[in-house]
């Protein structure tokens, strides 16, 4: 059975309670355990489902049904055990389709569930309001470990599922975050809950070039990363949530521990996402903002007394983390961290905003010699299935706009010229890609190693001059350049690429420097 072809029709209200758990809807086919043959309630169920577009059904021996379809069967949700089982099965389904996240959104009058697969959100199913609320509370209160014992729809909360009995194979943990949202309903408060599946990559091996190359970095970018691992100072990886920052950081840290085991490696994380071989991981986690800041500050101070050689700060969100990163860099440590920014050079104004809370002239501190070593920005783009992708230039003219809008076609003509023969678009799907037309994700990135000239431009508040210097004098390639190369090679779809990058492909061409290189 193709586990990824779930029909998103919600069966819960259609299936009689006596047979729930023995029927499953997948790929538009109703799969039924054979002991239900001849039952009158099955006849009425067939009639209801035909009105909803489900015409095909198959009976299976009970053993086969249990092995292949039971995890996709409907649940009656009559008690806490049923809700808990539904939650476990939901996680299993997300794992089967390779989802990175599960989105559960309670809108007050109904609840929707979506999976993020290959970077794109896809519908999974819909529940009634009551069942959705019970599902969210059960995930937080029973499956998860959290600092709060009770789920509260009016508060922002974090948790983590770590017990193996709730987790699919190769998922070492699930990170949970919930936010209260405005909704239509009696209380006017709903919940947006996101579950991030943290896949176990502890078995990864190979050199830094091999690991980063598999993620999609170019040879030149891998060379720059290798150079940064040999420098002291602060190297920062940036990008939006869910675009692989923690994965890259894990590979960098593990490769350094393997190459130089004589050094002491520490990480401070809120909380730790991945286990890292050879790294002493310090966890910081609290739902109370004031307590979290103090815990972060205490953890950093304690780590610096542990004689570290390399320090990793999972994410710079607070001034304590930013100041610690700078202080550690000034004392000759190698420091690696992540931050949310819109580009590699966009890391600078992001850090300035954090530091300006109680630091005068933060640029002077950031751009001091031996502080900033490297700046990186990345985004993940879905990869086209090599088996069913469609050559764009072979499409008839009247068909082309169905796959790529005219404005994007015009940008491709300007940027690629005659170099468009290898451009491909997403196909209809096949067995290899599980009917999705996509198979995994790759990185579009920009990696900058700093020098005195670049840092001086940044210190003087001339980011445009720094950017032009990097592009022209250091042969830097932006993440848009990287993405365009992937398009030209037929690796990614142009339309999906623009949607994932959130900027047009010719954004660099429209960038007008505000200052010039001296």
Image: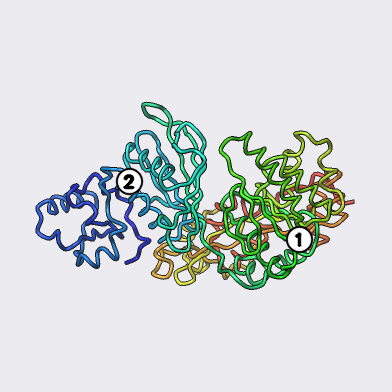
What residue is drawn where x is 68% and y is 60%? 481
Q: Is residue 189 left or right of residue 263?
A: left
Residue 202: horizontal and vertical position, in percent? 56, 65
Q: Nearer the viewer, residue 420 or 53?
A: 53
Residue 169: horizontal and vertical position, in percent? 44, 63
The answer to which image quadrant residue 110 occupies is top left
Residue 413 at least partly seen: no
Residue receiving disc 2: 83
Instruction: Please give the label number shown on residue 476.
Output: 1
As helix, strand or loop, the secondary structure at mark 2 comes to helix
Residue 159 at least partly seen: yes
Q: Which of marks 1 and 2 precedes in the sequence?
A: 2
The answer to which image quadrant residue 91 occupies is bottom left
As helix, strand or loop, the secondary structure at mark 1 comes to loop
Instruction: Please give the label number shown on residue 152.
Output: none
In three-dimensional space, the C-alpha distance between marks 2 and 1, rounded to whole angstroms, equals 52 Å
Is disc 1 surrounded by few (<14), some (14 to 19) or many (20+) residues within 10 Å? some
Q: Which color scheme is applied?
A: rainbow
Residue 40: horizontal and vertical position, in percent? 9, 52
């Amino acid at each position: 059975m193709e586990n990824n072809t779930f029909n998103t029709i919600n069966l819960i209200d259609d299936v009689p309670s006596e047979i729930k758990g023995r029927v499953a809807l997948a790929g538009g086919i109703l799969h039924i355990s054979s002991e239900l043959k001849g039952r009158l309630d099955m006849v009425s169920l067939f009639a209801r489902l035909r009105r909803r577009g489900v015409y095909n059904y198959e009976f299976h021996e009970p053993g086969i049904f249990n092995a292949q379809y039971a995890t996709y069967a409907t649940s009656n949700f009559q008690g806490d055990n049923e809700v808990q089982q539904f939650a476990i099965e939901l996680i299993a389904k997300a794992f089967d389709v390779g989802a990175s996240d599960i989105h559960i959104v309670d809108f007050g009058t109904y609840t929707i569930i979506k999976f993020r697969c290959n970077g794109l959100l896809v519908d999974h199913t819909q529940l009634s309001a009551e069942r959705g609320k019970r599902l969210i509370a059960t995930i937080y209160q029973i499956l998860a470990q959290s600092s709060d014992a009770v789920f509260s729809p009016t508060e922002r909360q974090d948790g983590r599922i770590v017990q193996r009995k709730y987790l699919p194979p190769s998922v070492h943990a699930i990170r949970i975050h919930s936010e209260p949202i405005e909704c239509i309903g009696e209380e006017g408060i709903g919940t947006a809950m996101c579950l991030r599946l943290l896949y176990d990559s502890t078995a990864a091996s190979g050199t830094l070039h091999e690991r980063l190359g598999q993620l999609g970095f170019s040879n030149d970018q891998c060379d720059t990363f290798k150079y940064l691992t040999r420098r002291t100072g602060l190297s920062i990886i940036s990008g939006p949530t869910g675009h692989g920052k923690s994965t890259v950081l894990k590979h960098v840290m593990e490769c350094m521990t393997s190459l130089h085991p004589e050094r002491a490696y520490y990480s401070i994380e809120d909380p730790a996402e991945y286990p890292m071989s050879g790294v002493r991981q310090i966890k910081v986690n609290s739902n109370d903002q004031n307590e979290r800041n103090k815990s972060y500050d205490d953890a950093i101070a304690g780590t610096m007394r542990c004689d570290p050689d390399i320090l990793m700060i999972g994410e710079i969100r607070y001034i304590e983390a930013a100041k610690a990163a700078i202080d550690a860099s000034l004392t000759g440590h190698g420091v690696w961290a992540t931050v949310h920014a819109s580009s590699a050079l966009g890391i600078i104004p992001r850090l300035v905003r954090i530091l300006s809370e109680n630091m005068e002239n933060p640029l002077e501190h950031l751009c001091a010699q031996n502080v900033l070593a490297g700046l990186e920005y990345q985004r993940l783009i879905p990869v086209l299935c090599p088996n069913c992708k469609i050559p764009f230039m072979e499409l008839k003219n009247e068909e082309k706009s169905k796959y790529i809008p005219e404005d994007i076609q015009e940008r491709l003509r300007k940027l690629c010229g005659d170099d468009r023969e290898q451009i491909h678009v997403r196909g209809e799907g096949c067995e290899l890609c599980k009917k999705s037309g996509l198979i995994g994700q790759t990185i579009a990135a920009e990696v900058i190693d700093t020098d005195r000239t670049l840092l001086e431009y940044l210190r003087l508040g001339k980011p445009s001059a720094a950017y032009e210097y990097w592009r022209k004098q250091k042969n830097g390639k932006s993440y848009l350049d990287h993405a365009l190369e992937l398009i030209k090679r037929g690796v990614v779809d142009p339309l999906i690429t623009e949607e994932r990058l959130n900027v047009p492909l010719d954004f660099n061409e429209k960038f007008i420097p505000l200052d010039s290189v001296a």
